[in-house]
Image (cartoon, rainbow, N blue to C red):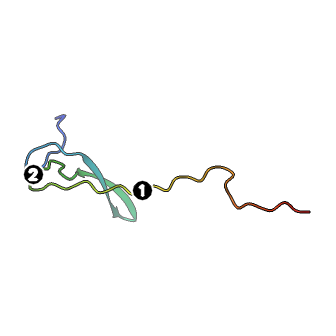
Amino acid sequence: MGGEGPVCPECGQPVETVVRRYKTLGAWVPLWVPGPCRNPDCPAYAAPAPRERARPPAPPGDGPRREPGP
């Protein structure tokens, strides 16, 4: 068994393995495939997607405030 990972078909540089999924007989099945090439000099280069900015969690006790009753 080779310990080599997937490589870009255009430039031969190593690429990461990503998981895709497909549905068969009503169940989702994982499929490990080569990821996009991140070599900027390669014709098949895929720029990394910008990460979505996560909304920071609200601090505890920062809910709606009630006025003190009589």
Amino acid beneath label 2:
Cys
The x and y percentages for residue 18 are: 28, 50
Label 2, label 1: how far apart the Cα atoms are: 29 Å
Residue extending farthest to the right is 70
User: In which quarter of the view is residue 65 placed?
Assistant: bottom right
The x and y percentages for residue 14 are: 16, 42
Q: How many marks?
A: 2
**Which is more foreground, mark 2 or mark 1?**
1
Amino acid beneath label 1:
Arg
In percent of the image, x 78 and y 62: which residue is there? 66
Circle 2 sits in a helix, a strand or a loop, which is it?
Answer: loop
In percent of the image, x 19 and y 40: which residue is there? 5
User: In which quarter of the view is residue 21 placed?
Assistant: bottom left
The x and y percentages for residue 59 are: 62, 50
The residue that disc 2 covers is 42
Circle 1 sits in a helix, a strand or a loop, which is it?
Answer: loop
Relative horizontal placement of residue 63, taking residue 37 as reference (left or right): right
The residue that disc 1 covers is 53
Q: On the rendered image, what quadrant is the N terminus found in?
A: top left
Relative horizontal placement of residue 26, taking residue 63 as reference (left or right): left
The x and y percentages for residue 13 are: 12, 43
**Considering only order in the chain, which callout, 1 or 2, is on the residue closer to the N terminus?**
2
Q: On the rendered image, what quadrant is the C terminus found in?
A: bottom right
